[in-house]
Amino acid sequence: MVYHPTERLSDRAGWAGERLLFLGVDDRWRSLAMDGLGLAEESWPGPDTYGSGSLSRDGSLWAAQTHRGVVLLDLTSGDVRHVSFPASHPHVVRVDWIPGKDVVSAYAAPPESSDYGTFHIDAAGRVTPARYPGWRTRFDVDGTPTEIIGATHEGLMVKRWTGDGVSSRTVAPGAKVPRPMRRHAFGVFSTSHLALHAARREWPSRAPAQVWVLDKSTGAMGARLQVPATSSLVGWTDDDTLRLLIANRRLVDWEPRTGDLRRVLDLTGPYPAAGEWAAATVAIPSH
């Protein structure tokens, strides 16, 4: 697991202000100071934009965005590699390891522009364009890009992006999504379920958010959980429980079938103040 503590707009400029904490399978923490990786200062993404990056399926490789491309770190050897992006789209704002593949999906834009594009980075460091929109896309367990595009009175809608076209379908035709939460929902996929985090439009919000677990094949509602607005989905674990980051400060595992909640870990602070525009982030290996 990788944990990026709370970052704020008032943080120091440059990589000197960035430190990530990695938790290994031996239950030991390792600390990574980003200014030790030799990255150019002008490639620093800035406070409130960096986050925890993304871990490969075996947890040995870590990827994160820069203003010039993507940095790749081998956590077993310490080797660092920076993959430069095309001059047309150097500004990377999100990275994800694609489940089941040693390929990074990255979302990038031209300088001073919001005309984003999606790119793949393979094991050899080759950068190639992809068709799907990377900002709102998450991946199903088979690696299919799946974009949650919003909810209407008809239910929750998604797009599944394939190599030769796009197919759209209704995931949860019976789900009554509150109007303030429509088009502001993000999800993570397991083999049989979709976990959905739905929060209100305003940020920071004091109103609670909802976590829904839906059956992928039928769209039936399986379970609901109310959480503080500043919570987020971390991902599904190997034993099909859902890991959540609650209020930027603790990891909790939720078993939707039984409703059981288990506190996994209290993370170190400092924590965001109530209503503050700031957040911590956590990433676990892709499956």
Image: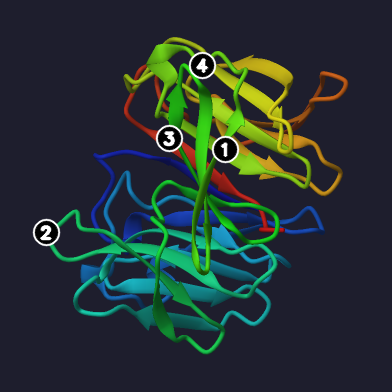
C-alpha span from label 2 to label 4:
35 Å
- Of the residues shown, which amino acid type is indicated by label 2? Glu
Q: Which residue is mark 4?
A: 177
Give the residue at x 69% y 29%. Answer: 214
Q: Residue furthest left?
A: 112
Where residue 152 sits in the image (x, y, percent)? 44, 21
First reached walking from the N terminus: tag 1 or tag 2: 2
Q: Which residue is mark 2?
A: 112
Query: What SS does tag 1 mark?
Result: strand
Residue 102 location, quadrant = bottom right
Residue count near mark 3 (Cα–Cα under 10 Å), binned few <14, some 14–19, many ≥20: many
Q: Which residue is mark 1?
A: 187
First reached walking from the N terminus: tag 2 or tag 3: 2
Q: Is residue 274 visible?
A: no
- Of the residues shown, which amino acid type is indicated by label 1? Gly
Give the residue at x 66% y 58%. Answer: 286
Query: Of residues 202 and 4, which is closer to you in this image?
Result: 202
Where residue 33 sits in the image (x, y, percent)? 46, 63
Q: Are marks 2 and 4 in contact (CB under 8 Å)?
A: no
- Of the residues shown, which amino acid type is indicated by label 4? Val
Q: Is residue 120 left or right of residue 218?
A: left
First reached walking from the N terminus: tag 1 or tag 3: 1
Q: Which mark is residue 241?
A: none
Query: Of residues 35 and 122, which is closer to you in this image?
Result: 122
Where residue 27 sits in the image (x, y, percent)? 79, 53
First reached walking from the N terminus: tag 2 or tag 4: 2
Q: Residue furthest bottom?
A: 124
In this view, the mark in front (2 or 4): 4
Q: Are marks 1 and 3 in contact (CB under 8 Å)?
A: no
